[in-house]
Image: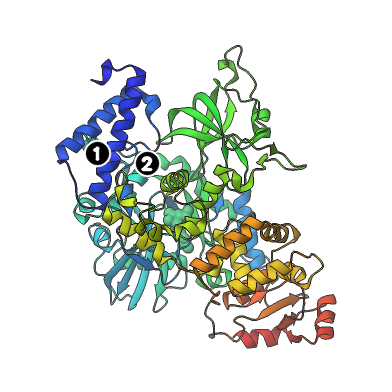
Amino acid sequence: MASLFDHQDAKKRHAELVKAIRHHDALYYQKDAPEISDADYDALRGELEVLEAKYPDLVTPESPTRKVGAEAASGFKKVRHAVPMLSLSNAFEDQDVLDFIERVRNFLNLKNAAISVVAEPKIDGLSCSLRYEGGKLAMAATRGDGAEGEDITANIRTVKDVPHILKGDPPDILEVRGEIYMRRDEFAALNAAQEKAGKPVFANPRNAAAGSVRQLDPKISAARPLHFFGYALGASSAPIADSQWDIRKKLKSYGFAEAEPSQLCETAEDILAYYRKVMEGRAEIPYDIDGVVYKVNRIDWQERLGFVSRAPRWAIAHKFPAQQAVTALKDIVIQVGRTGTLTPVADLEPVTVGGVVVSRATLHNEDEIVRKDVRVGDHVIVQRAGDVIPQIVGVVMDKRKSGAKKFVFPDTCPVCGSKAVREEGEVARRCTGGLICGAQAVERLKHFVSRNAFDIEGLGDKIINEFWTEGLVRTPGDIFRLAENDAKGIAQLKNREGWGAQSVKKLFDAIEARRTIGLERFIYALGIPQVGEATAKKLAANYASFDNWVAAMTRAQDRESEAWTELLTIEDIGPSVAGDVVDFFAEAHNREVLQDLGSVLTIAPYVVPRAGSSPVAGKTVVFTGTLSQMTRGEAKARAEALGAKVAGSVSKKTDYVIAGEDAGSKLKNARELGVAVLSEKEWLDLIA
Ligand code: IVH
């Protein structure tokens, strides 16, 4: 029995149980082929729970007692969203909200006109898109990476609030976006039942809802108390309203539930008063909300505002303040990231913060440790805000034990032993080991296969760590040789603990499916410092093909070259980002990786959005002078939405210069280079 164990035995038994449960989870959820009875499985879980209750320091967020159903993630069909599913940018302070209104006003050039805004709760669940065809529910999908989600139709059909047939007179095609959630009382009842049955409990209602939706067996989803609120539209064959407020009303009339309280706010004061009212009344709302959302009411304005990267310009989430707790700091561990940055991480006595057990938190960097004077053994304040990684905000000084020593930040890499240096003006200390540093190599691989990069299902962080340690995958190209090496008997994946022929096939299929990849994803996947998704896309749009890009970056090594100048004409790419891109190519190892990938992959040229549908698709344009019909920001966003590239300076490659009032040197350059110059009106006629 667990109570007779000393700590050493408990730790050993804990590891055995975790391993066994994971093994049986994989058999049950991923292969539908359990080897033991439900009762025996429940007994394993029961023993683990008893052990963890007695030795709470053994609990980690990865423990099977803290995770349920997530393992069932694979096995759903992928679906592309007709209209991308966006996320929201966040406001934390009142000033952020005022700035949002100001940005909208400036973007639309509204001067002093009132901007009505719909305010409604931000539900802490998981987003879902429902597609109706001829008024009938045809498909339900998760958000996934925003462009592609998972088909969860069978499970969503079991959610009572989701109408199977819409009431009234909806358009032929209508996609309703909204949130799947579980009420707090239902969550408590579900956990009580789980506990009684010796099954693991969920950390919070959001995890419970997500775990329930992602069950491969719709019968399990059906037995879970799930709900749905509609809050926005995706594709639609006809407009249903010309304001967000009326969209809410229409959705209600079709049979959807709408989150309350909602309010049509006319002024910033209204908005902030609404925020305080909802925050103070939060406990009365029967489900978890993590803030409120503001949406510009006029749909024509929403359309003009469009979106940046992954979030609409016409909406913002105003988050509630973070939740905090105090716990003991057991140790400070140094993690080494993809680019060699040493990040101090707090190893904590597990503590519940806002319903989630936290045992690790970031300490940001060396200076932050000094500033807060954090020492091992201290009691620290842990904070969780929304989706961000938990952080240490301070020390409870009167609980400090005498003799607690100041933390000394290492000047060598804890993984490879190379020197860790801090450049002038930088906050981060970096390992200089490059790819001889195992940590950097592994982190680069994790980034390479991550969701917005190659998105290879089945190659999670844990597997990458294992494959790297065992030498099966050392470079990105090795991933695409896995199947071949397995066939030769080198990898022998099916003999791994918890694996079988089926899971190996699934992994190889997932890898094969990514052997052709778009240039923008490919560039992002390389993990070049400062090259996020938006920059990767701009590079792809500018250079169009892999070969062209590689050739140009090779030439751009010479800072006097035209290729270097061209790189700098790309919007938002300044000398610092350009320098990082070029430096990446300067390293022999990176060039080898690129050459290797070029030989195992098909890197598809960049596809201009809606190419062909607009005369400006694929053209490079430069705006100069003062525009009268719209702001520079709106002009740029509209041009990009039509597939044009907007550059900051004029070169031979510029197709059009659009000259507003008082255009100066750029107009002169255009004339000298013989580039076509359009007035604002001519430009608007061209794109109309
Ligand atoms: S509007 C383009 N409204 O919050 C419209 N989102 O943090 C985008 N969410 O992905 C969403 N309540 O899953 C909207 N009332 C609400 C919401 C809401 C919750 C979620 C949604 C979104 C996430 C962004």
The label on residue 189 is 1
Q: Tell me the residue at 30%/25% (across/down).
A: 51
Q: Tell me the residue at 22%/58% (across/down).
A: 158
- Please name whichever residue, 513 or 589, is drawn nearer the observer in this view of the structure: 589
User: Which quadrant is home to the C terminus?
Assistant: bottom right
Please tell me which of labels 2 and 1 falls first in the chain.
1
Q: Tell me the residue at 25%/57% (across/down).
A: 159
Q: Using residue 556 as the reference point, say whether residue 169 is left or right of it.
A: left
The structure's colour scheme is rainbow
Q: Using residue 505 as the reference point, say whether residue 315 is left or right of it.
A: right
- Please name whichever residue, 286 or 501, is drawn nearer the observer in this view of the structure: 501
Q: Tell me the residue at 46%/44% (across/down).
A: 465
Residue 554 found in image quarter: bottom right
Residue 6 found in image quarter: top left
Q: Where is residue 179 shown, x and y percent of the image?
A: 37, 56
C-alpha gap between disc 2 and disc 1? 18 Å
Q: Is residue 452 visible in this depiction of the protein?
A: no
Q: Where is residue 460 shown, x and y percent of the image?
A: 42, 50
The residue type indicated by label 2 comes to Glu
The residue type indicated by label 1 comes to Ala
Front of the two marks 2 and 1: 1
Secondary-structure class at tag 1: helix
